[in-house]
Every structure is written in structure tokens, then in C-alpha cells.
Image (tube, helix red, strand yellow):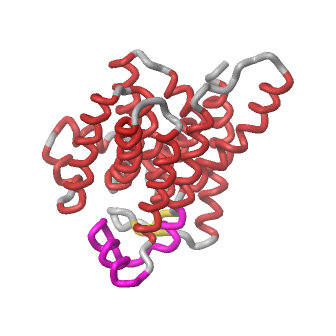
Amino acid sequence: MQALPFLFSLVVAVALVPLVRTRLVDAGLQRENYRGNRLPVPIGLAIVPAALIALIPLVLIARLTTLDVFPGDLPLVLTFIPGVALLGLLDDILSGDSRGWRQHLSAGLGGGFSSGLLKAAGTLGLALLVASSLPGSDTDFLIAAAVLVLATNAFNLLDLRPGRSVKAFLLLGLGLTLATRITQPAAALGIFIGPVLVAGFFDLREKAMLGDTGSNVIGAMAGIWIVLTLDTTEQLVALAILALINLYGEFRSLSKVIEKVPVIRHLDSFGRPS
């Protein structure tokens, strides 16, 4: 029964995402993608509402029957992901010319407004709150918070081509589940996985773009999957990898690296319009 959050949110998203796309077009919220095509953005705006609407039947079932429909870590998920989505939406709406940590930091230190710094600080606050609810020592707490923050930004850096961040998230989740045989995180994240798949399909087929709203949600989900699955030592390894991705993406193009590896390049482009 704990698959119901995924199923209900998937159904809601199938109905909601096309409506949001149409409204974005009508509102003139469009941006050029890497091909120069103007697409509605951010379609990731639909992810959290679809999940919250799915709570209506889920709560009624849980309250009026004896069925157990809510995974144990769902409150943690519902704390972190909507907050990160809001911060991503603010970045989509208010971002200026600044790009990357260095430019955002420079803007902030210069007394200007930086939506990137706002997003980073807000994500850190949420990450600390969520990590503080997990069992473990103070060191475990700090490592988990760092993983959540860096994973959120890493998937934002990956979202430079259609479908890339969603594919990376699915591969990460599949790899973690197969390697550890731990399925609880997938169940806890299910209420958001459904909408991410639908919004991700629109992104992959170049019907819309996720925007920071969507890519940050996907990164937040990836971070939660990591901290709920791996022990502290394994999280340290994940943290090092995430730090390298963030650092490399600040100075170099991740797309150029992907293009140089044939297998990864093929997987990265699979499903996009020719």
C-alpha cells in the first residue's frame, strides 16, 4: 500500500503538468534552450502541487481505513522538497545575470541581491533541519546536511540538457537500491517521483524546461535518497563525489565531459527529439 503515494501523484501529474505548461505559455514564461528553441519554463513548478493534491485521497484512506499508506520518512521528505522547490522558483523568477557560486557571492558581497545566495542559504537551513532529525552523532548530522546541499546544487548543474537530471536521478536511485537492497527511501520519495517522471518527460521531449524549480527538487530527492540509504562512511564518499561535481561545474563544462564518453553520451541523448 505504500506505493499509493507514487500512483496517486503520478495520476495527478499526468493531468496537471499539461495544464501548467499551457499556462506558462499563455503567461509568456518561456526561455531559449540549448538549441535556441523557446520553451515554457519552469515545468518543475507542477511537481510539488501534484504531490500535495495526491495527499487528499491518501489522507482520507489513512484516516478512514486501516491501510498503512504513508512511509515512515514521508514527513522528512515533505519538509525538505517543497521548501527547496520554493527556493528554486524564486531563483527562476528573480535571477539576474549572475551565474555560478563565484558570481553570486560577488554580487552578495557587493551589496546586491543574489537569488543564488538566497537559494543556497535557504537550502542550507532546510538541510540542517532535516539532518537534525536523523539518528547519529554531530559528525553524522553535518555530513548528511552537506550531502543534501551539494546534491541539490549538483543536479542543478547537470540540468543543461533535456532529461539529463531526471536520468541521473533514476540511475542513482536504481544503483542505491540494487547495491543496498534498501527500498524505504524509494517509497518515501514516491509521492514526488511520480510528478518528476511526468515533468521529466516533458523536459526530455523538449516540450518544456524543468527550470531551477524542477532540477533543485530532483537534486533534493537525490540527496535524501543518499542520506536515507548510506552509512556515514559511504556518505563521505558520496559527499566527495558531489563536491567534485560542484567544483568542476563551477569552472568547466559538464556537458563537454559527457560528450567525450560514448556510452554516457548515448544515454544522455536517448529519448530527445532528433
Residue sitting at x 50%, y 74%: 94
**Where does the image place residue 182, in percent across and percent down from the top left?**
44, 19
User: Which range is magenta?
Assistant: 89-112
Residue lying at the far front in this picture: please name it: 138
Q: Quadrant of residue 230?
A: top left
Residue 146, magenta (yes or no):
no
Q: Quadrant of residue 233?
A: top left
Q: Is residue 144 left or right of residue 42?
A: left
Q: Main secondary structure of the magenta part?
A: helix
Q: Is residue 247 above or below residue 237?
A: below
Residue sitting at x 24%, y 34%: 237
**Where does the image place residue 63, in percent across and percent down from the top left?**
82, 27
Q: Is residue 114 left or right of residue 65?
A: left
Whether residue 273 is visible: no
Whether residue 70 is visible: yes
Residue sitting at x 54%, y 47%: 81
**Where does the image place residue 92, in percent across and percent down from the top left?**
49, 66
Q: Is residue 139 above or below residue 123?
A: above
